[in-house]
């Protein structure tokens, strides 16, 4: 019971990070394709939407890392070693992106440096979700090598492949789609709203194409991903529901129904992640030898018990605080 509860909190943390911080990263990605039409107005909307919450959203990443470190220490150790290159790049992206956004927003001197801040912000907005998706792909693919086999086999081959890169690109597109949907309701300007509506429609199509490319890349890399989805009822049901939800989602986006579009987009992404989680459960890190599962890598029961007490107490503080934050900055400003 304790192990499954810890895994549940870990999954929820990852889900919330993708839905909330993912949209922030997606907003940075959108900045690279603002176009010439109302460019400054779009950037103002993105900056105003992100400013109150971008830093708070990283609490979910911190929480996921803490749960993994405390509850599943051997899996944490193996992941940190095997994927230390993409994980380092991901964390550097988080740091550079936050720094660039802060300096761009609050620097007292407005000069050419603003262009450099924006360039770093956009680039790191790509790098972080790309690396996140690459690590997720590597955890499922399971090309884990031993140190004795050499640097490339142990630290590059597990993630530098077609499937992992495809998952990384799909993650970037999915986050950009979330951002576009969320941003529809962040402006009252009809022209700017229409721009974000068009972006959301295009990115939704790109996400579907990206999902197909992930399946194709998996087959080319020797991973029967389609067969795995077919063999797990919950995964298949989740992907089917995520596909069917496209109909009301497109209708909501086209009409500019902000609340409905946001909820449906979040549900769609949640269904994709739920299908992926079930596909991998109970494995955390796949391996050709002995996969690390939540059971084989779990900490002692006493550690898990106290961790869950802390998580339950922390949830009672975090969720009301987050709701209050959004209430202040996202509702009362309208």
Image (spheres, grey):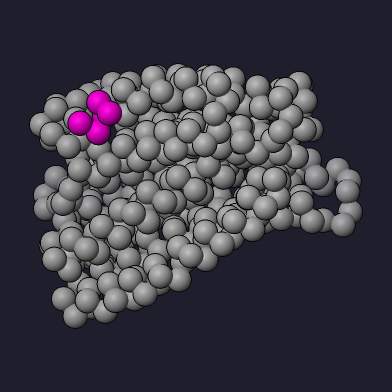
Magenta residues span 237-241
Q: Is residue 9 left or right of residue 112?
A: left
Residue 41 in view of the camera: yes
Residue at 77 percent of width and 33 percent of height = 41
Residue at 78 percent of width and 40 percent of height = 115
Residue 126 in view of the camera: no
The image quadrant where one finds the N terminus is bottom left
> Horizontal and vertical percent for residue 122?
64, 39
The image quadrant where one finds the C terminus is top right
Q: Is residue 107 left or right of residue 263?
A: right
Q: Is residue 37 left or right of residue 282?
A: right
Query: Which of the two residues, 305 or 161, is positioned nearer the viewer here?
Result: 305
Residue at 11 percent of width and 49 percent of height = 289
Query: Which of the two residues, 274 or 137, is positioned nearer the viewer here?
Result: 274
Query: Which of the two residues, 37 or 242, is positioned nearer the viewer here?
Result: 242
Asked where in the image residue 160 lies, by quadrant, the reply is top left
């Amino acid at each position: 019971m304790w192990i499954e509860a810890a895994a549940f909190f870990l999954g929820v943390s990852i889900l919330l990070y993708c839905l909330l911080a993912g949209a922030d990263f997606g907003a940075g990605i959108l900045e690279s394709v603002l176009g010439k039409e109302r460019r400054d107005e779009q950037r103002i909307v993105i900056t105003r939407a992100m400013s109150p919450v971008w830093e708070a959203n990283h609490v979910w990443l911190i929480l996921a890392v803490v749960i993994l470190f405390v509850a599943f220490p051997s899996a944490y150790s193996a992941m940190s070693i095997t994927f230390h290159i993409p994980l380092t790049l991901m964390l550097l992206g988080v740091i550079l992106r936050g720094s660039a956004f802060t300096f761009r927003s609050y620097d007292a001197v407005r000069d050419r440096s603003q262009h450099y801040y924006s360039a770093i912000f956009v680039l790191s907005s790509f790098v972080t979700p790309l690396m996140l998706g690459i690590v997720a792909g590597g955890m499922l693919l399971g090309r884990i090598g031993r140190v004795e086999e050499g640097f490339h086999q142990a630290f590059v081959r597990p993630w530098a492949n077609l499937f992992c890169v495809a998952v990384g690109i799909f993650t970037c597109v999915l986050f950009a789609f979330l951002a576009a949907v969320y941003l529809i309701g962040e402006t009252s300007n009809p022209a700017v709203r229409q721009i974000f509506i068009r972006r959301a429609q295009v990115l939704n199509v790109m996400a579907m194409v990206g999902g197909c490319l992930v399946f194709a890349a998996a087959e080319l890399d020797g991973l029967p991903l389609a067969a795995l989805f077919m063999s797990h009822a919950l995964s298949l049901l989740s992907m089917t529901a995520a596909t069917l939800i496209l109909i009301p989602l497109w209708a909501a986006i086209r009409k500019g129904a902000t609340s409905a579009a946001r909820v449906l987009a979040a549900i769609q992404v949640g269904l994709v992640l739920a299908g992926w989680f079930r596909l991998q459960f109970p494995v955390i890190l796949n391996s050709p030898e002995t996969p690390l599962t939540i059971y084989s890598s779990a900490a002692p029961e006493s550690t898990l018990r106290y961790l869950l007490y802390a998580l339950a107490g922390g949830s009672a503080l975090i969720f009301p605080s987050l709701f209050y934050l959004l209430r202040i900055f996202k509702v009362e400003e309208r």
